[in-house]
Image: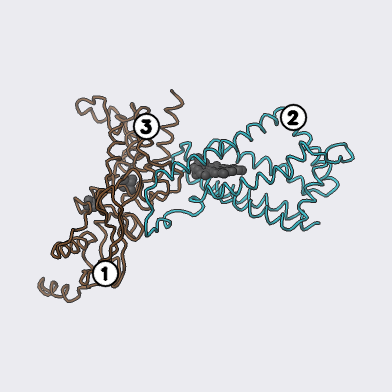
Chain colours: A cyan, B brown
Amino acid sequence: MALTGLFLCFFLIIHLLGNFQLLLPPEEAQLQYNLYSDFLSNNLVVKIISYVLYASILVHTLDAIYLSIKAKKAKGSSYVKDKRNRASKWYSRQMMLLGTIVFAFLVIHFKDFWFPYKFGDLSSDINGNKDLYTLVIVSFQKLWYVILYAVAILALGFHLLHGFFSAIRSIGLYNPTYNRIVKSVGVVFAVAITLGYFVIPLYIYLNA
Amino acid sequence: MNSFSLLSEAINNRIVMKIHLKIWRQKNQNTKGQLETYTLDDVDAEMSFLEMLDMLNLKLAKQGERPVEFDHDCREGICGQCGVMINGIAHGPLKNTTTCQLHMRSFKDGDTIFVEPFKAKAFPVIRDLKVNRSALDEIIAAGGYISVSTGQAPEANSILVSHEEAESAFDSAACIGCGACVATCKNASAALFTSSKISQLAKLPQGKKESNKRTVDMVNRMEDLGFGHCTNTEACQVECPQDISVLNIAQMNYEYNKAKLVK
Ligand code: HEM
Ligand code: SF4
Ligand code: FES
């Protein structure tokens, strides 16, 4: 869980940095983004990493389902009066729900961008690269699509707010000082990822 | 002021409350339980929670009814026997206190108090508020000890233990085995309990030697007994009467991962 989760975190950073190219002036962004996408889909190292990524999503999700089933089995009958929530953060208890939202989003995300790019017939830009840029820009002209993204990214943000430090604990860092640092880094990371991923669709929508 | 006037002042200032109780009654493990309502008219604010239950039981006994069974032993916060859910919180509303150290002054006149047993698959109800927590003993039996012969007391300076390490091991050793962590955890995990023993021993030279085997054995036993998995919600430490740190769990994970890697 921790290893797959942290790998996904690592991917989130790389993916975000790549996507920031969408914020360049339009003509430049189009050519550069399409060139970048072409580079990614033809590079062997990236190919290997992408298989690790698919595997991570799968293993992480299966592990999540396994842990949820285990927790359900371990629980006794429920309390009539239950105030246990005071002792923990809501998002730490709702990792499965947040993860499910992220997963549903990933399905849509793959269907709308990954699948057309890999298997659909996209038109080409003047350099002859598949024009993923235009597909992305057109998609984010729709308000409901931007809102869908916002919801999913917010869910991801809360997932990371708990997930990042939790993963480090699961691996076994127990020094109190380092743990305080990890917690702060986790908050910064979750906020940065949330804002970063939200800025892109918002920028495209507002500049339409 | 002499002691007599102090006493009479205390008696005159006595706060008496009416308390409604909704208590879980369950004949045995195989029957279904339910909440029963009782009312006590003259609960003294200075009574402990268990004394209030004693008062209820006295009343029930006089009426020829079966008293409410609950666990308790030391009544001074050190044995870990007295855990129950009070208004949906393990050991009641105060932080880091056992049920026996909770007093009725934490409640108000006219309050309704829900009292339920700790609930987890690994903690079957024996009767009413009393649950079987032997599963925790079984985890300790799986490795929560040192089996190497340590011989005579060694020369104190031959094996150095830093003050910080000694204090930290002592903090981990403070667990009283009450089970509040399990009852509070949404996953019914016994990670805090198990890790407190594992890291207490791993911090000391006598315990370090067997740490790999101990950790794997205890963690496996914990899983076999049907406890859930820790997902670091940290609720356990908040409700733990001994404020056992969740970092013990991180150390248990470290010891476990290390043991698996060297194997
Ligand atoms: C980009 C996608 C994702 C990232 C970056 C991510 C990251 C993480 C991280 C770092 C953890 C902490 C691991 C640990 O405590 O050992 C975690 C836990 C968890 N994840 Fe994800 N995750 C993602 C997607 C998902 C999905 C799709 C699901 C489920 C459908 C999911 C369900 C869970 C659950 C239930 C936990 C709780 C386990 C725990 O707290 O230890 N996650 N995630
Ligand atoms: S860790 Fe705390 S809550 Fe858990 S059994 Fe020990 S004393 Fe009780
Ligand atoms: S009765 Fe011993 S800790 Fe409460």
Residue indicated by mark 1: B19
Q: Can residue A9 be seen in this view?
A: yes
The quadrant of the rendering that contains the C terminus of chain B is top left
Residue A59 lies in quadrant: top right
Residue B4 lies in quadrant: bottom left
**Relative to B229, residue B42 above or below:** below
Q: Position of residue A85 (x, y in %)?
A: 43, 56
**Residue A173 in the figure: left or right of residue B227:** right
Quadrant position of ligand 1: top right
Foreground tag (1 vs 2): 1
Callout 1–callout 3 Cβ contact below 8 Å: no
Q: Position of residue B121 (x, y in %)?
A: 35, 44
In the drawing, what numbered circle is on residue B215? Answer: 3
**Chain identifier of the residue bearing label 2 in the image:** A
Which amino acid type is marked by label 3?
Answer: Thr
Q: Which residue is drawn at 28% across and 47% down?
A: B29
The reply to whether the residue tagged 2 has its Cβ within 8 angstroms of ligand 1 is no
**Residue A131 in the figure: left or right of residue B185:** right
Q: Position of residue B171 (x, y in %)?
A: 32, 44
Q: Where is residue B226 in the image (x, y as percent from the top left)?
A: 37, 39
The residue tagged with tag 2: helix, strand or loop? loop
The residue tagged with tag 1: helix, strand or loop? strand
**Residue B109 in the figure: left or right of residue A147:** left
In the drawing, what numbered circle is on residue A43? Answer: 2
Whole-angstrom CA distance, mark 3 to mark 2, is: 44 Å
**Chain identifier of the residue bearing label 1 in the image:** B
